[in-house]
Amino acid sequence: VTRTVTSCLVPVVSVAGAAITTVEGLRQKNGEAHPIQTRFGHHFASQCGFCTPGMVMQMYGALQGTNGGRQASVSHMEKQMECGNLCRCTGYRPILDVAKSFCEDRPAGDLQLVSDEKGTTLDGPYDAGADPIVPDFIKEGSGTGLSLTLGAHKQPY
């Protein structure tokens, strides 16, 4: 199960044994940026960059289980992107354009691509095989090897 959370509000002990993916962890095995990150750049969906990591992760969470956007509707993506992140610079049109760029049910000509680069990698669903892989030790439930201690008496948690 993939959940997008506000990391500053989640106690670290509550995620013991869970796989955690950050915006840095979305990078593909070949070193290239994830399709969401690439499209953020080509749609100029980021200005100051303060909200960008949260927006990228919110979009990643919204696209999970949609086969790279093949089963995602425009209304689903719009609703998912309403939650949790505020942008004070860019406005939401380019951010929503990125979200809608993955959906097959959007009207033709609906997006305003501002980058000079044209190509199929900037439009339509992406190969979900590019998504990070959950480590085997998490899948197998063998634990993380983390030991946490709390308080002055170093009580194990």
Image: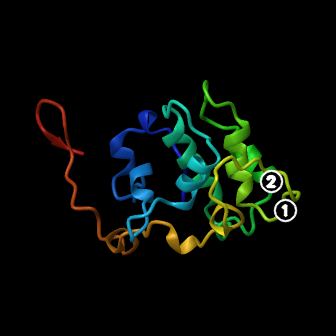
Asked if disc 2 and disc 1 are in contact, CB closer than 8 Å, the reply is: yes
The residue lying toward the viewer, choosing from 15 and 132, is 132
Mark 2 surroundings: few (<14), some (14-19) or many (≥20) residues within 10 A: many
Percent x, y of residue 93: 74, 38
Percent x, y of residue 145: 21, 61
Could you tell me the amino acid type at mark 2?
Answer: Val
> Which quadrant does the N terminus fall into?
bottom right
**Could you tell me how many numbered marks the image carries?**
2
Q: What element carries label 1?
A: loop
| Residue farthest to the front, as pictured | 116
Residue at 40 percent across and 72 percent down: it is 139
Q: What element carries label 2?
A: helix
Could you tell me the amino acid type at mark 1?
Answer: Asp
Mark 1 highlights which residue?
105
Residue at 70 percent across and 38 percent down: it is 82
Q: Earlier in the sequence, mark 2 or mark 1?
A: 2
Quadrant in which residue 134 is drawn: bottom left
Percent x, y of residue 117: 62, 58
Q: On the rendered structure, is 53 left or right of 88?
A: left
Q: On the rendered structure, is 123 left or right of 141?
A: right
| Residue farthest to the right, as pictured | 107
146 w.r.t. 30: above or below: above
- Residue 20 is labelled as none
- Residue 74 is labelled as 2
82 w.r.t. 107: above or below: above
Mark 1 surroundings: few (<14), some (14-19) or many (≥20) residues within 10 A: some
> Which quadrant does the C terminus fall into?
top left
Residue at 59 percent across and 73 percent down: it is 127
